[in-house]
Amino acid sequence: MPTRRQMRVGHLLQQEISDIIRTAVRDPDLGFVTITEVEVSGDLARARVHVGVMGEDSDVRNTMKALGRARGLVRSELAQRVHLKRIPSLVFELDETAREAQRIESLINQFESEQAQLGRPSGENDQQLPAADYQLVIAQIAELLNARRPTVILIHHHPDGDAVGSGLALSLALEQSGQFVPVLCADPVPARYHFLPETDRVTSVVPDDFDVAVVLDAGDCQQLGELAGIVEQASVVVWIDHHRTNQGGGDVDYLDTGAAATALQVYRVISALGAQIDERIATCLYCGLATDTGFFTYENTSADVLIAAGELVQAGADPWGIATEVQNRIGPAAARLRGRALACLATAANGRIVHAALTPRDFTVAGASQEDTEGIIDLLKLVADSGVQVLFKAISHNHWRVSLRSSAVDVAAIAEAFGGGGHVPAAGCSVPGALPEVRAKVIQAIEDALDRKR
């Protein structure tokens, strides 16, 4: 594993060599070149310059010869630009992953052309080929992950089915190329997801050395909980998420607010990696897709979602088995907690808002934990004529986690006002204070939003 010093020098040389080749090398045989990485020896005396070359095989051969001829010029220019005691000797090596990315883009373009000739939009019959805006970033992520640099996957604390399923699926896919990539999470996997394959890959133990961090299904670093600082330790950060409130923060951001689940985005990345979608990966992805769409009952359930679900079933996912494990098997503590939530159900705004609260005493009497609250908010949605549902859950003394659902207003905007975030129909936030005060503030914000919709 290179030291921080080696990585800093390598990054500096990568930038400067890229500029020198672009501006100073005049060899007519030189084609389109991308410097993908520069590996520097421990004594900084040698540097392996990995280059991606686009074009036919003859273009690649000519370009590599031109780079060999240009080594002296490049070193001379580096001596004038960088402040090193000694300019390292250079060896240019072909990076085949760049050509693989070109191949992927070519296949996508060919597919779009064929779809246009058939008179239908691209993506209509294949969920693995997403909107054009994301094709290149998916190829870029695939290229980076196929380089087999030491990698970790990070998912948000208090993980749900989408986070756990997406993390495990990507880890299993990367294992096919000989990489073991742990899934880091500040909290354990909830019991209802223990049926997923190899959940022991999810851990809070951070490896000593890693280069790439892939963040999945987290709107910001804060959602990573105690592991938030891990992001800063990575040389490269890839961020894959679908929450509307995500402002980005990675070196490579794949933020698709139109995706129903992060699992759908990970499905596309795994397909671009060239990994086989086996039964284990299909099960994980289907779980993520199903849980974030309410098992295909929420408004984000689109034709694309159902097509992807069908493909995952063909690959081995068991819809009945997954639904049974996630939805239909709760313990006595969770059942008692649901009863206590429904017993205190109340309404506001002439029945348009339905809300309930779970106090510390409720958790104690039921013998339940935070994990047992999953699914309760969906029970509130069953109340007829309600447009907004709110569940207040005690996470400590005078501190509440607020879950919001709505088909009437943008609850992500409401959650954002309290320091949270999420999606237009489903969001959440954490609010300190006594329950009467917190409930009054949140309900008032919802009533104001409903009034603006009139």
Image: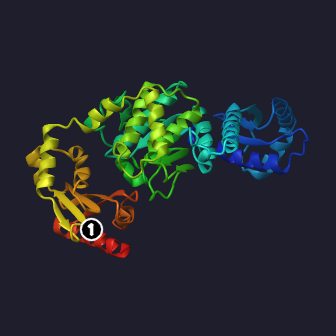
Q: Position of residue 136 (x, y in %)?
A: 64, 45
Q: Is residue 396 above or below residue 172?
A: below
Q: Position of residue 218 (x, y in %)?
A: 42, 50
What color scheme is it? rainbow
Q: Which residue is mark 1?
A: 442
Q: Is residue 351 above or below residue 123?
A: below
Identify the secondary structure beneath mark 1. helix
Q: Position of residue 35 (x, y in %)?
A: 72, 41
Task: Write the residue at 18% across / 65% down.
Answer: 347
Residue 211 visible to the viewer? no
Compared across the picture, whether 343 is left or right of 263 comes to left
Q: Position of residue 92 (x, y in %)?
A: 77, 34
Q: Is residue 354 above or below residue 135?
A: below
Task: Write the residue at 89% across / 38% down.
Answer: 29
Q: Which residue is at the front of the view, 175 or 328?
A: 328
Name the image quarter holding residue 145: top right
Task: Write the residue at 50% across / 37% down.
Answer: 267
The amino acid pointed to by label 1 is: Val
How many numbered circles does the render carry? 1
